[in-house]
Image (tube, helix red, strand yellow):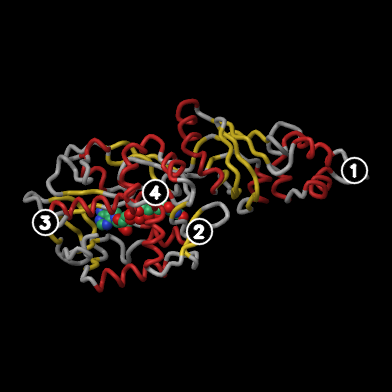
Amino acid sequence: MLSEAGVAVAVYDRMPSPARKLLMAGRGGLNLTHTEPLDAFLSRYGAARPRLEHLIRAFPPEAVRAWADDLGAETFAGTSGRVFPRAMKAAPLLRALLARLAARGVSLNPRHAWTGWDGDGALAFDRPGGTPLRITPDATLLALGGASWPRLGSDGGWAPVLAARGVALAPFAPANSGLLIPWTPHLRERFAGTPLKRIAVTFGGRTVRGEALITAAGLEGGAVYALAAAVRDTVAARGEAAITLDLRPDLAPEEVARRLAAPRRGQSLSNHLRRHLALAPAAVAILREGPAPPETAIKALPLRVTGVAGLDRAISTAGGLRWEELDDDLALRRLPAVHAAGEMLDWEAPTGGHLLTACLATGRAAGRGVLRRLGGA
Ligand SMILES: Cc1cc2nc3c(=O)[nH]c(=O)nc-3n(C[C@H](O)[C@H](O)[C@H](O)COP(=O)(O)OP(=O)(O)OC[C@H]3O[C@@H](n4cnc5c(N)ncnc54)[C@H](O)[C@@H]3O)c2cc1C
């Protein structure tokens, strides 16, 4: 937005190279956005929808695709409606974006950790081996991310800096995180790292179909991330929660019963389940984790959840800069000429491209706000 309008832009990042979290998101294919109807898309932002709606309408999923396509990503929509670059990774898109920014004269300054403002109101940065840098730009756009996966650069260290300036923040909480399940040692030792494919997970009346990965600590993956916010809130209120797994969501209970009634002919129950219901060994093993007999648990296996995985492993962060602190240009009301965008702001959404879309849409809005401030829009 800014370099295209001819504004001189300098980007400072604490890490040795830029966009590490975007590159990490690329490991899962880089789900940029989603083709579901816009109303359904917007509903994924829950309580933050009223704040985000006009920003996303101004840069909707089609605009995200057009932006990425223009950078050579050749996006496509999978059968689930999720949109990915054809390369299924972030590096080519990032390379094209960095080349575009370099061609427009944007300077990239790695290994510059922003520490706040000095007594004269200048931005202060620590840099290795050198004296701290002080700069006084015409406008500042903070896009410092949330607090998940801190080793990728975004550690939420900006929160106390802004809080010290009187800016109100909602506490950080893990979003799209794995669920902590007290597995038996057998399941943990034999099946950690094994995916459960084509399952459905139910919590609080909501059922999500997809995949989950068994880990030593519990379950990770799309199907559980979608329910993690609700599970997190229940665990916070009640100390634990119960999810239900359907290991053959494509089969009606009667069909499961019919297949199980087939003569066993001396086979073990495990083999019987594998043969007649095509259950993978991990699915058979997980059936034995709950109190219900395997025959009934196939369609409704209750599992006790004791918590959600912490911020260090969560895909995204709930909480952050409270919306009341921001004006329509995403400028901070209490600080002169400082705008903010991305996961720093107080919203959360499931995976499905909704995170990157909102980051891009808020980035555009803050960029437009800076332009307006500088008299360019
Ligand atoms: C494993 C994983 C997979 C994901 N997959 C997807 C996906 O497929 N689709 C999707 O929509 N979303 C996905 N996400 C989420 C998505 O990557 C984030 O929501 C998005 O990157 C947030 O963008 P941002 O610009 O707000 O922050 P970030 O991408 O976190 O960038 C913030 C930048 O600020 C820098 N920084 C922070 N503090 C300072 C400081 N004090 N000084 C200087 N620099 C600083 C950091 O180094 C970082 O480069 C995934 C996340 C993870 C962890």
| Closer-to-camera residue (91/62) | 62
Q: CA distance from mark 2 to mark 1?
A: 41 Å
Pointer 2: what residue? 28
Dot in front, 4 or 3: 3
Tag 3: residue type? Asp
| Mark in the foreground, 4 or 1 | 1
Q: Could you tell me which secondary element the residue under label 3 belongs to?
A: loop
Which image quarter is the C terminus in?
Answer: bottom left
Q: Is residue 151 visible?
A: no
Mark closer to the chain start, 4 or 3? 3
In the depicted structure, whether residue 192 falls above or below residue 306: below
Residue shown at the point (34%, 54%) measured from the top left: 360
- Of mark 2 and mark 1, the one earlier in the sequence is 2
Q: In x, y percent, where is residue 74?
A: 46, 67
Q: Which mark is residue 138?
A: 3
Label 3, residues with CA under 10 Å away: few <14, some 14-19, many ≥20 = few
Q: Is mark 2 within 8 Å of ligand 1?
A: yes
Q: CA distance from mark 3 to mark 2?
A: 38 Å
* Place of residue 129 in the rendered image (x, y in percent of width and height, measured from the top left): 20, 67
Question: Where is residue 260 drawn, in percent x and y?
Answer: 83, 40
Q: Residue 345 is drawn in which quadrant? A: top left
